[in-house]
Image: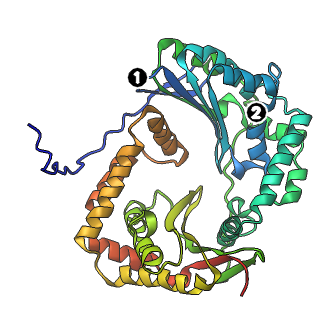
């Protein structure tokens, strides 16, 4: 009999097993990554194009090339695309990052041939129609104007701009006028340069049949498509971090201020990165963190505060983010630095470090439990330029990091004098 009065035994996770995709180079050279898992009759297909904001020659170019794929092709109008995907119960996501553009399709197996035909037309023969482009630009420009009144958006853009400088692609942000400069010709120029079979890869995950694999190969792997002569270049850019310690952005109607504190730190490939993740989680990366316990629960300065590390193609950026009433801003910043100092001088107790480790291990398990999350994990490996041993190395780092190492990392990287403080809100 099960004794419900007795707590189940807690078992430490000894190893992590992430099934690697089966990889196949199709006849035209495109790599097909197959992740067969799950029992539901549904699949996810990701087409990755190896170009993003880094490669654009004008602001917003990569975003709107990707966004306009669903607005009309030689075979389908925007209305037909929307109606057909809806009729077949499919879901389409379009997104772009610094180095990649993504087309993601979720489809029922029984309608896969129909939905793949639509996606093929979107990728291979978009027409970027003027009427639809105008409508999309107006909608996005309006959203930008709304966002530009919000203190969190103002602080975020100001912080990233201050970290990278004017000339770095990560530090450049669009203004309202940039939406007016987007034309069909500039989108076609970017599309012709980067959307081709020599610059793409495909991931498929879910309950995969031989028919699905055959359809994918016929569609994206048989004949070359696009203008193959164009090669992608990762041009290096100089990071020019501002010498200013504090940057303030006025928003006269704001009821509270947004605060960002941080600095350039490290890439994922850095030897300290994986154990640094444990320190950052303990400091401000989950609900029971030091920052939350002190600044939210004890002092009541904010509803929430977090710390994390954002990755960019050539570096990583550490950032603390929160919002607070104007009168609490200075005291809140002092408490942030106070918590940094404690981590530099005191040894973290075993119970606290153990709780953080268990939280991170639990998050790892949840991140890789389904076929679509597995696909995201391997796409992350490719787009972050990491080795396939990254998952095992992450587990080992979390399990092995010691309280003394946490203290050493805090002394090495948590230097308040090196932190940039960005505040957006109403001046006193």
| Classed neighbour count for the residue bearing mark 1: other residues with Cα under 10 Å, few (<14), some (14–19), many (≥20) | few
Looking at the rendered image, the quarter that the N terminus falls into is top left
Q: Position of residue 250 (x, y in %)?
A: 76, 78
Q: Position of residue 81 (x, y in %)?
A: 75, 24
Q: Residue furthest top?
A: 211
Q: Residue at x 50, y 64 (%)?
A: 308
Q: Position of residue 32 (x, y in %)?
A: 53, 26
**Residue 390 seen in render:** yes
Q: Between tags 1 and 2, which lies in front? A: 1
Looking at the rendered image, the quarter that the C terminus falls into is bottom right
Q: Along the horizontal axis of the image, is 64 left or right of 264?
A: right
Separation (CA) of disc 1 from disc 2? 31 Å
Residue that mark 1 sits on? 39
Q: Residue furthest left?
A: 1
Q: Is residue 17 above or below residue 110?
A: below
Q: Residue at x 74, y 46 (%)?
A: 63
Q: Position of residue 393 (x, y in %)?
A: 34, 52
Q: Is residue 428 above or below residue 68?
A: below
Q: Residue at x 59, y 59 (%)?
A: 314
Look at the numbered disc 2 and give the secondary structure of its residue. Answer: helix
Q: Along the horizontal axis of the image, is 369 left or right of 191?
A: left
Q: Residue furthest front?
A: 5
Using the rendered view, name the quadrant where residue 154 is placed. Answer: bottom right
Q: Is residue 214 above or below residue 56?
A: above
């Amino acid at each position: 009999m099960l004794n419900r009065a007795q707590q189940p035994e807690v078992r430490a996770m000894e190893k992590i097993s992430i099934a690697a995709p089966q990889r196949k180079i199709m006849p035209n050279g495109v790599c097909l990554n197959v992740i067969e898992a799950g029992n539901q009759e549904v699949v996810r297909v990701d087409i990755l194009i190896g170009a993003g904001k880094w490669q654009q020659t004008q602001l917003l170019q990569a975003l709107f090339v990707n966004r306009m794929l669903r607005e009309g092709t030689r075979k389908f109008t925007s209305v037909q695309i929307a109606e057909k995907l809806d009729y077949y119960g499919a879901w389409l996501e379009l997104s772009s990052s610094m180095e990649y553009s993504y087309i993601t399709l979720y489809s029922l197996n029984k309608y896969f041939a129909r939905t793949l035909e639509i996606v093929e037309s979107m990728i291979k023969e978009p027409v970027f129609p003027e009427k639809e482009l105008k409508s999309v630009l107006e909608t996005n420009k309006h959203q930008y104007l709304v966002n530009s009144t919000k203190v969190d958006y103002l602080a975020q853009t100001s912080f990233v701009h201050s970290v990278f400088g004017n000339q770095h692609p990560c530090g450049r942000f669009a203004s309202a006028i940039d939406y007016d400069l987007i034309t069909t010709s500039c989108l076609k120029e970017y599309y012709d340069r980067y959307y081709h079979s020599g610059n793409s890869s495909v991931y498929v995950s879910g309950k995969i049949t031989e028919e699905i694999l055959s359809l994918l190969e016929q569609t994206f792997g048989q004949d070359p498509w696009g203008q193959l002569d164009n090669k992608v270049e990762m041009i290096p850019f100089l990071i020019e971090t501002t010498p200013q310690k504090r940057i303030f952005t006025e928003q006269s109607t704001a009821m509270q201020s947004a605060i960002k504190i941080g600095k350039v730190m490290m890439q994922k490939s850095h030897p300290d990165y994986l154990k640094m993740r444990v320190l950052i989680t303990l400091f401000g990366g989950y609900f029971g963190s030091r920052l939350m316990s002190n600044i939210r629960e004890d002092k009541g300065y904010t509803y929430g505060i977090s710390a994390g590390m954002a990755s960019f193609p050539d570096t990583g950026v550490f950032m603390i983010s929160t919002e607070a009433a104007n009168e609490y801003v200075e005291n809140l910043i002092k408490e942030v630095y106070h918590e940094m100092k404690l981590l530099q001088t005191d040894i973290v107790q075993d119970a606290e470090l153990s709780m953080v480790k268990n939280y991170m291990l639990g998050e790892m398990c949840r991140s890789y439990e389904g076929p679509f999350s597995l696909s995201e994990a391997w796409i992350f490996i490719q787009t972050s330029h990491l080795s396939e041993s990254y998952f095992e190395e992450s587990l080992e780092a979390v399990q092995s990091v010691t309280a003394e190492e946490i203290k050493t990392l805090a002394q090495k990287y948590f230097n308040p004098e090196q932190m940039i403080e960005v505040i957006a809100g109403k001046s006193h």
